[in-house]
């Protein structure tokens, strides 16, 4: 796409797919992951909002993004994840391949630019999961639905 900001040009969908194919089956088995409602994800760009356990890299992030990449159809746009600047800095400094798999700095302006350029965005605002329920529900991903706890 023309006139993309530099941070969007680093995304490498082929690398993201390669890593997902290698990592996702292992973490799905380890965390006994379940996916419900995946067919409710729109075939256009969207802003996804989820919960996580508060760490920089959490299982649900890898499970969700890996599953999205593996199940992505040509109609669905690529998805980027708003990420803590600290985590992006580390990934860039050590030249980690993960920085090219959809990690972008968690800034409002980056989300707006990515959405304008047709990408979907995933954000985990955090602090919304009760610690007592965290371990019980960390591997159950529910899309476009709510579940009482």
Image (spheres, helix red, strand yellow):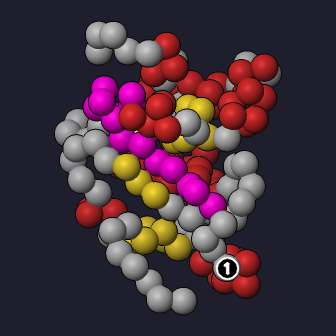
131 or 15: nearer the eye?
Answer: 131
Numbered label tally:
1
Q: What residue is disc 1 on?
A: 130
Mark 1: secondary structure: loop
- The furthest residue to the top: 2
Name above or below for residue 51 compared with residue 7.
below
The structure residue drawn at horizontal position 68% and vertical position 55%, both measured from the top left corner, is 58
Classify residue 92 by image quadrant.
top right
Q: Position of residue 76 (x, y in %)?
A: 26, 41
Provide the residue span drawn in magenta: 113-126
Q: Position of residue 35 (x, y in %)?
A: 43, 68
- The furthest residue to the front: 109
Q: Is residue 4 left or right of residue 140?
A: left
The structure residue drawn at horizontal position 48% and vertical position 31%, both measured from the top left corner, is 110
Q: Position of residue 11 (x, y in %)?
A: 48, 23
Residue 96 visible (yes or no): yes
The structure residue drawn at horizontal position 66% and vertical position 66%, both measured from the top left corner, is 127
For label 1, the crowd category at 10 Å Cα-Cα, with few meaning under 14, some 14 to 19 and many 20 or more, is few
Is 65 a magenta residue? Answer: no
The structure residue drawn at horizontal position 56% and vertical position 25%, both measured from the top left corner, is 100
Q: Position of residue 1 (x, y in %)?
A: 29, 15
143 or 83: nearer the eye?
Answer: 83
Residue 78 visible (yes or no): no
Name above or below for residue 96 compared with residue 62.
above
**The C terminus lies in which quarter of the figure?**
bottom right
Is 121 a magenta residue? Answer: yes
29 or 49: nearer the eye?
Answer: 49
């Amino acid at each position: 796409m023309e006139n993309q900001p530099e941070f969007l040009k680093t995304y490498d969908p082929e690398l993201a797919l390669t890593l997902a194919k290698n990592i996702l089956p292992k973490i799905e088995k380890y965390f006994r992951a379940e996916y419900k409602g995946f067919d409710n994800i729109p075939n256009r760009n969207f802003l996804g909002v989820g919960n996580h356990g508060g760490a920089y890299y959490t299982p649900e992030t890898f499970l969700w993004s890996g599953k999205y990449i593996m199940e992505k159809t040509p109609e669905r746009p690529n998805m980027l994840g708003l990420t803590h600047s600290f985590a992006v800095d580390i990934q860039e400094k050590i030249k980690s391949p993960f920085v090219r798999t959809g990690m972008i700095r968690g800034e409002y302006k980056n989300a707006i630019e990515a959405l304008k350029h047709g990408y979907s965005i995933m954000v985990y605002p955090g602090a919304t999961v009760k610690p007592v329920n965290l371990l019980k529900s960390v591997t159950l991903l529910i899309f476009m639905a709510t579940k009482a706890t």
